[in-house]
Image (spheres, rainbow, N blue to C red):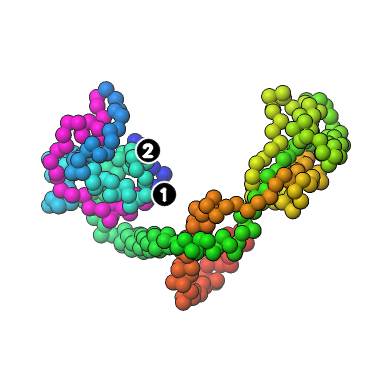
Amino acid sequence: MRSLCMAGVFILAMAWAQVKVNSVTPAASPNAASAAHGSDNGRQEAVPASAIAPAAAVITIKGLCPETAPHSTTRAADAACETVITRAEFEKLADVLHMGTGSQTWHQLGSSYPQILVMAHEAERRGVDKQPRFQERLRFARLEILSQELIRQLREEAAQVPEKDVADYYQKNSGEFEQVSLERIVIPNRADQTNKSEDAMTAEAELLHTRAVQGEDFAKLQKEAYDFAGVSGDSEAKPKLGKMRRRGLPPTHAAVFDLKVGQVSEVISDATGHYIYKLDAREIASLDSVKVEITGRLRQQRTEKVVQSIQQPFTTDINQKYFGAVKEDD
């Protein structure tokens, strides 16, 4: 039996509590049924969803009575029943679970959902839904879903970012979008292939740095660094990094963004090797090229602001004697 991870099953179980299975609908056409269930010769390729009518069955569970049928107390009474999930019902469920469109997760949902329905039906037959434990879990699930739906609505409302806000943010924070064109020489810390020591590699890095400052070509110097270290000839020297932002480099290398155009950095050494940079050009990325990034950032800020305005009036006191002190790494 194919199963989902525990978190996925819990989400699906909560969804089942929210989504009603309609009563038996007319059987799907042979083509639709074949697309939904495959054939005796093996699984068929899925047909486009548009080729299957919204009211056509995509899942049929024989022996499971629909919710509209009188509640039975024995499995024998269910034998003549069947529950049909139409394409429209299945896609509605997939949508609220954020499972994309026609993805592999649809097949996973199609396999797991009937299992959840059958197990839930048996739980109801046994009266599990009347037990206090179930009622408490259902109460919490309702609160959680309400919170999630509110966040979804707030994000949708925040999604409408005016063009003026985007332009204003760009003007006020233009420094965030500074980008530079860099060249870089990489010298390994060690050269196991040529039995050169770490001290020898450090000395080679300093020599290459002197030549780089004197204006020698970075591609040539990188090739020599590879040769000295015994790096495979398949490693083509490509020192040009192209345009990049400050966050595109490790924090210990970020100082190269403060170089002047044409200037070569000092040798930067860390656990991964020795590095020499040259700054070839500096510019501010155009508004058009960063508009999507800014819009996403403003959407997030707008959502967080609304959430904070909702949470701000409320305060919470935690009984430390009961819960214990919060650990540093929690």
In this view, the residue in front, 255 or 312, is: 255
Residue 59: image quadrant is top left
Say the numbered circle drawn on residue 104: 2
Disc 2 residue crowd, few under 14, some 14–19, many 20+, Cα 10 Å: few
Residue at 31%, 29% (x, y): give it. Answer: 45
Disc 1 residue crowd, few under 14, some 14–19, many 20+, Cα 10 Å: few
In this view, the residue in front, 59 or 306, is: 306
Residue 137 % position (x, y): 35, 59
Tell me the distance, in whole angstroms, between the alpha carbons under discs 1 and 2.
18 Å
Contact? badges 1 and 2 (CB < 8 Å): no
Residue at 21%, 49% (x, y): give it. Answer: 21
Quick check: can you spot residue 116? no
Span of residues in magenta: 11-40
Say the numbered circle drawn on residue 7: 1
Q: Is residue 145 left or right of residue 262?
A: left
Quick check: can you spot residue 129? yes
Q: Is residue 291 left or right of residue 66?
A: right
Residue 46 % position (x, y): 30, 32
Judge whether 231 appears above or below 113 on screen.
Answer: above
Question: In the rendered structure, does residue 246 fall within the stretch colored magenta?
Answer: no
Residue at 52%, 52% (x, y): give it. Answer: 288
